[in-house]
Amino acid sequence: MVVTDTLILPDTDAGVTRASDLLRAGQLVALPTETVYGLAGDARNDRAVAAIYEAKGRPSFNPLIVHLPTVQAAHHYVVWNDMAEALANAFWPGPLTMVLPLKEGHGLSPLVTAGLDTVAIRLPAHPLARKLLTVSECPLAAPSANPSGKISPTTAEHVMAGLDGRIAAVLDGGACPVGVESTIIGVYDDVPRLLRPGGLSVEDAERVLDQPLREAGKGITAPGQLTSHYAPGARVRLNATSREDGEMLLGFGPMECDLNLSETGDVIEAATNLFPALHTLDALAPQGIAVAPIPDHGLGLAINDRLSRAAAPRD
Ligand code: TXA
Ligand code: MG
């Protein structure tokens, strides 16, 4: 791997132009989305996509999400259907990824789809991501911009802490407002399937589809098949109401603790604060991180999914 000085590009026209030039030349650029920062490369370029896996140190070729500027662009790559239409109308641009059948002649690198006949696509809502997608005219493959298995980044500083010297640039758009990755829904089947809970609540998706989301079928699903994921250095203990020896307590709702995800008990605010709080506690290197119970509704489902992976036994 060629070690480079990673540029920090500002949220200006010049910053976007530079990021676009780098992407068009097959380089990697981390970009802000409303969920987390993504590590982007041209999804049509095999070398760029391979470089994403290398920079993250991803153990295997998981399929990646392709980010697009418009629904019209999506039609170029996937076979559309009524469920996709309903979800796109309601939630795009936004924190929803849909997995759909690939269209013939799509032109995407086979490394993006890991050889599957479906592809995950998303229209991010973040204005800077949208600008870069439009200016570069590249479909952008982008997993979260963190080394594999580590905590996802919600600021440019988090990205630099994990990937400085391994990528060409990071476009600095400040803190990500949603804070957890997109919800992934498979609509390649006769029924919609929840492949990963995330920034769009399951309840909202089910209301629009007018049916429940089923579990993922057999075969490939979304992340966290790798059970330990999103892991800070310290061990993580869930559903804690008080500290044990050497632990710091991450709270929820009114309580005495070291850091609180949401003093008012708001799961949306807690989702925004989750990864920054784990980064902060991780930097303090406690022996353990104890986390208060989080209700399992709305974005609480995504928070508990990420926390259970952070707490999973490590290899
Ligand atoms: O919010 C997000 O979704 C962020 C931002 C950067 O957009 N991206 C993100 O990407 O979380 P990533 O690569 O960490 O997660 C993508 C997940 C993969 O782990 C994979 O399991 C699933 O999407 N996926 C991708 N293509 C798929 C497919 N064809 N079938 C099933 N799952 C798929
Ligand atoms: Mg990730």
Image (tube, helix red, strand yellow):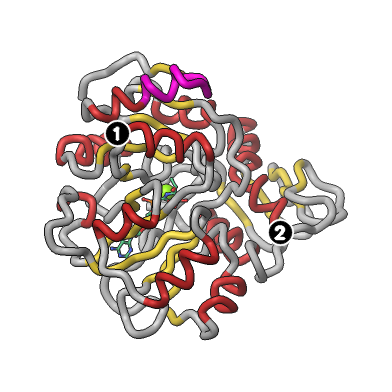
Q: Residue at x 72, y 46 (%)?
A: 245
- On screen, residue 113 versus residue 123, left or right, reads left
Q: Residue at x 39, y 51 (%)?
A: 70
Residue 130 at x, y percent in the picture: 45, 40
The range drawn in magenta is 9-19
Number of labelled discs? Answer: 2
Q: Which mark is residue 55?
A: 1
Q: Which mark is residue 226?
A: none
- Going by the numbered disc 2, the residue's amino acid type is Val
Residue 257 at x, y percent in the picture: 81, 46
Residue 156 painted magenta: no
- On screen, residue 77 versus residue 143, left or right, reads left
- On screen, residue 72 versus residue 48, left or right, reads right
Q: Residue at x 59, y 44 (%)?
A: 275
Write down the residue under mark 2: 267
- Going by the numbered disc 1, the residue's amino acid type is Ala
